[in-house]
């Protein structure tokens, strides 16, 4: 496959880079867990701490992108990016509904990563519309609040 005309190795051949891929995926899972807790929260007394936790995770992802060189595991697209993109899109839609700025002035690398993803023809072909994501997130939030 290719990204902007460059060959891409979706699964790195180096054992070290494969380990980096797994660790990056684990960190992204923590980010998404933080997002879902923040998004589904209905307790105003928890809002600030949940938002702070989400911000810390987003800052960490931004730092990872800065040090990696553009994508989550390096200068080229990998399976980690491919796996994370649809979930990050959900995070963006959910955060937007709560007026939370994912792309603040400190998160330049995160903004650049997302711009690269959004600019790809492959993503435009498979991305869900925001209203479909909003509907799914609303159903998830209702299910989570019914559990309490």
Image (tube, rainbow, N blue to C red):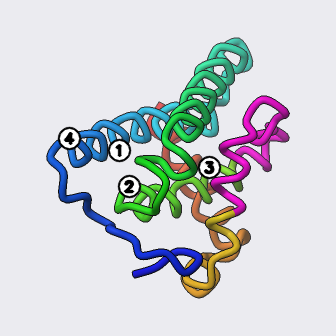
Tell me whether the residue at label 2 lies in contact with that at label 4, contact meaning CB atoms closer than 8 angstroms. no
Secondary element at tag 2: helix
Say whether marks 1 and 4 touch (CB < 8 Å): no
Q: CA distance from mark 2 to mark 3?
A: 16 Å
Pointer 1 and pointer 2: residues touching (CB < 8 Å)? yes
Quick one: label 3, few (<14), some, or many (20+) residues within 10 Å?
many
- Residue marked by disc 4: 16
Label 2 crowd (10 A; few <14 / some 14-19 / many >=20): many
Residue drawn 67% across the image and 29% down it: 42
Q: Quadrant of the N terminus?
A: bottom left
Label 3 residue SS: helix
In the picture provided, is 5 more to the left or to the right than 21?
right
Depth-wise, is mark 1 or mark 4 nearer the camera? 4
What label sits on residue 91 in the rendered view? 3
- The residue carrying mark 2 is 80
The 10 Å Cα crowd at callout 4, few under 14, some 14 to 19, many 20 or more, is few
Q: Which residues are magenta?
A: 95-115
Q: Earlier in the sequence, mark 3 or mark 1?
A: 1
Q: CA distance from mark 1 to mark 4?
A: 14 Å
Measured in 3D between alpha carbons, the distance from the residue under mark 3 to the one under mark 1, in whole angstroms, is 16 Å
Q: Earlier in the sequence, mark 1 or mark 4?
A: 4
């Amino acid at each position: 496959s290719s990204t902007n005309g460059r060959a891409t190795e979706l699964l790195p051949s180096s054992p070290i880079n494969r380990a980096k891929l797994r660790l990056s995926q684990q960190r992204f899972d923590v980010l998404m867990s933080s997002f879902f807790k923040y998004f589904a929260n209905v307790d105003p007394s928890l809002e600030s701490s949940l938002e702070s936790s989400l911000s810390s995770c987003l800052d960490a992802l931004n730092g990872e992108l800065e040090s990696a060189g553009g994508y989550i595991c390096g200068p080229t697209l990998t399976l980690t990016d491919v796996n994370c993109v649809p979930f990050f899109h959900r995070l963006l839609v959910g955060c937007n509904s709560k007026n939370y700025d994912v792309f603040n002035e400190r998160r330049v690398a995160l903004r650049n990563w997302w711009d690269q993803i959004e600019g790809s023809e492959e993503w435009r072909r498979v991305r869900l519309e925001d209203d479909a994501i909003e509907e799914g997130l609303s159903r998830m939030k209702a299910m989570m609040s019914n559990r309490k």
